Every structure is written in C-alpha cells, then in structure tokens.
Amino acid sequence: MSNPVTATNGAQFAGIATVADAGLQGMITLRGDLSSSVLQAAVKAATGAAVPAQRKIEISDNGAAAWMSPDELLLLVPYEQAVAKTAELAEALKGEHALAANVSDARSFLSIAGEGARETLAKIAPVDLSAEAFKPGDFRRSRTAQVAAAFWLQKDGSFRVVCFRSVGAYMFNLLSASAHPQSAVGVYTA
C-alpha cells in the first residue's frame, strides 16, 4: 500500500507572501438541515465546533466546521480520522435527511502567510479582502481565476485555501505567481 501524498507534495514559494502546501487534511462534506439539533450535535461530536453562521468557519482544538451553502458544511478533521469520523456522522444522522462524504483525497489544501497574504489572494479572487471587510473566521466560496475554491482567514493573519485536487498544482502555481516579489501592488500595506 502506498502512502498518501498531496497534489503539490510539500511545495513552497516565498515572495510577498509564502504559499505552501498545507499538508494532508481530513475533509468531510456534510449536507443536511443545518438547523437540525441532531445534525448540530453530530457536527459538535465530530469536530468540537458548532455549526457556523453564513460565510463563517468555527474552529476548535479538534477540527472545524465551515459554511459552504444553506444546506452544506465542510468539516475539517485530522486526516487519519476522516474515514472513522465520516462513519460516525452517518451513524449519528440515521433517520435524518443528510449525507456525509469523505472528500479528503479529492481536495488540495494550501496556505498563504506573510505580510502580502491578502494581496496575493485578492489578485485572483473577486472578494473584498481588506482588513475591515474580511476578518479572522470569515469564510468564502468563490472563483479564484479559473477554478472554484474556498478560503478563510486564520487568527494569525494567514489564509487557508481548499480546491479540487485536480487543480491543486494549478492553484499553487497561480498563487505563487500572485505572490511573486515583482508583482507587488501594495494595496493592503500601510
């Protein structure tokens, strides 16, 4: 049996921001009635996080829950626990109109850190990423150049980006070009 690897296999680029492969991440797509107390309890048990408000991510010590749409969450758990957590969710949601699917190996997970992180992402996403408009815990699903992605801002000022694995290398290269030192615009610098 082979060892799991990410699409970008530990790649890193340093420029106005550091773009890096964020490693293996357990990801579960959960569809259902987000106001259901049964679903909310299952999310809390799986991640330690509450069901988030619209366009938010709730992060706990054991995982996270991100709002994807009015009936969908992206749950983040340790990679090695994703299969078991998906089965636990399915069991907890028996009788509910819900679906839990492990999508860990179908996604790429990247980070953007450093002073130019906002600018790097803003160049490719049609989202106001100013400090006033996009704060830690904010979450968006959007287009990033030619591909769909989701991203959020961490408390430390870094971003996490999730996209399909099939476009993981493209996304890494796109973000690296956007972070190139000669591409600095300075829109978010003081």
Image (tube, helix red, strand yellow):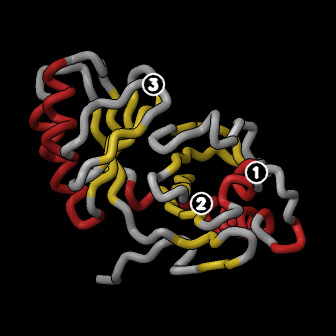
Residue at position x 24%, y 20% in the image: 97
Q: Residues within 10 Å of mark 2 (few under 14, many from 20)?
A: few
Q: Which mark is residue 54?
A: 3
What secondary structure is found at the residue carrying circle 1?
loop
Q: Residue furthest bottom?
A: 2
Using residue 154 as the reference point, say whether residue 180 is left or right of it. right
Which of the two marks, 1 or 3, is nearer to us in this view?
Answer: 1
Q: With respect to residue 138, does 177 lie above or below?
A: below
What secondary structure is found at the residue carrying circle 2?
helix
Q: Which mark is residue 188?
A: 1
Residue 101 on image: x %, y %: 32, 43
Residue at position x 61%, y 79% in the image: 12
Amino acid under disc 3: Gln
Give whichever of 22, 185 is nearer the camera.
Answer: 185
Q: With respect to residue 91, does 2 lie above or below?
A: below
Q: With respect to residue 118, does 75 lie above or below?
A: above
Using residue 2 as the reference point, say whether residue 46 is left or right of it. left
In the rendered structure, are the residues bearing label 2 and label 3 in contact, judged by CB atoms less than 8 Å apart? no
Gap in angstroms between the C-alphas marked 2 and 3: 27 Å
Amino acid under disc 2: Ser
Q: Which residue is mark 2?
A: 166
Residue 111 on image: x %, y %: 54, 64
